Image (tube, grey):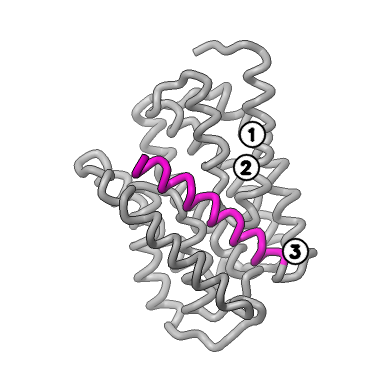
Amino acid sequence: MEFELYYYLIFFLAAFLAGFVDSIAGGGGIITVPVLLASGMPPHIALATNKLQSSFGSFTASFNYIKKGLVKLKDVYLGIFFTFIGATLGTYSILLLDASLLSKIIPFMLVFIFMYTLFTPKLGSQDRHHVLKPTFFYLIFGLAIGFYDGFFGPGTGSFWTIAIVMLLGLNLKSATAQTKIMNFTSNIVSLSVFIIGGKVLWTVGILMGMGQMLGAYLGSSLVVKKEVSFIRTFFLTIVGITIVKLFYDSYF
C-alpha cells in the first residue's frame, strides 16, 4: 500500500507517543491501532503492522530497564518461558475461536484494576512480601496472560503490572520493568505468526518502530527517575482511557 507523504509523519509521531506511553503504563495500542485503521489499512494488516512497530518499543523499554538495573533477566526467565508458551497457544487459538466474548468481558476486568488501584493509594509504593512464590506465579500468569495477549491483547500491560504488584509484592517501578519484558515476549510470538502469514507492511512498521524506540527510551528513562506516585497516576490515566475505548468498541 502507498500513502500520502504526510501520513508517514503521522505514523511516526503516533508511534513516538505510543512508545512513550506504553513504556510507562502500557496501552500504546490505543494510539497506534486507530491511526493505522484510519489510514485505510485492512484490519488484519493494521494489527500485524502494529505488532511489528510495538515490538521495537517493548524491546527498547526492556533493554533500558535492564541496563538501568530495574530488572534482571535471571529473575524473570521463567516468566519469559511461560509467556512464550502462552502467547503461542493464544495466537494459534485465535485462528480457531471467536474473540468477541473476551471483548465484552475485558473492560469489566480493567474497571476492577482501575478501582482497586485508585482506592489503594499505597499499592506499589514499596516492595512487599510476595503472596505467591515466583515459580508458581510465572507458571500461572505467564501462561494465562501470554495466552490472552496472543489471543486478544488490549490491557495486557495493565494485567501484568497489577498482578506483579499484588502477588509478587514488587513496587510499581519494578513491576513496570518486568511487564515490558513479558510484553516483548508475547509481541514477538504474535509478530512471527503475522510475518508467516505475509500481513505486515514493512515500510510503515519499521518507520513507526523508529518512533517507538525513541518514545520508549524517553518513557522508560523517565520511570527510572520519577517517584512511584507519578507512575501510579500515569497508570490510572492509561487504564481509564483503555476502559472507555474498549466499552465504546464493544457496546456502542
* Residue 149 in picture, x, y percent from top left: 40, 51
Residue that protrudes farthest toward the right in the picture:
225
Residue topped by disc 3: 224
Which amino acid lies under the numbered mark 2 shown in the image of this protein? Ala
- Relative vertical location of residue 29 with respect to residue 177 in this rendering, above or below: above
Mark closer to the chain start, 3 or 1: 1
On the rendered image, what quadrant is the C terminus found in? top left
Name the foreground residue: 141 vs 111. Answer: 111
**Rendered image: mark on residue 18:** 2
Q: Is disc 2 placed on a helix, strand or loop?
A: helix
CA–CA distance in space, label 3 to label 2: 18 Å
Which amino acid lies under the numbered mark 3 shown in the image of this protein? Val
Magenta region, residue range: 230-252
Q: Main secondary structure of the magenta part?
A: helix
- Relative vertical location of residue 126 with respect to residue 101 in this rendering, above or below: below
* Residue 207 in picture, x, y percent from top left: 63, 27
Which amino acid lies under the numbered mark 1 shown in the image of this protein? Ala
Q: Is disc 3 placed on a helix, strand or loop?
A: helix
Asked if the magenta segment contains residue 247, the reply would be yes
For disc 3, the neighbor class at 10 Å (few under 14, some 14 to 19, many from 20) is: some
Residue topped by disc 1: 14
Residue that protrudes farthest toward the left in the picture:
96
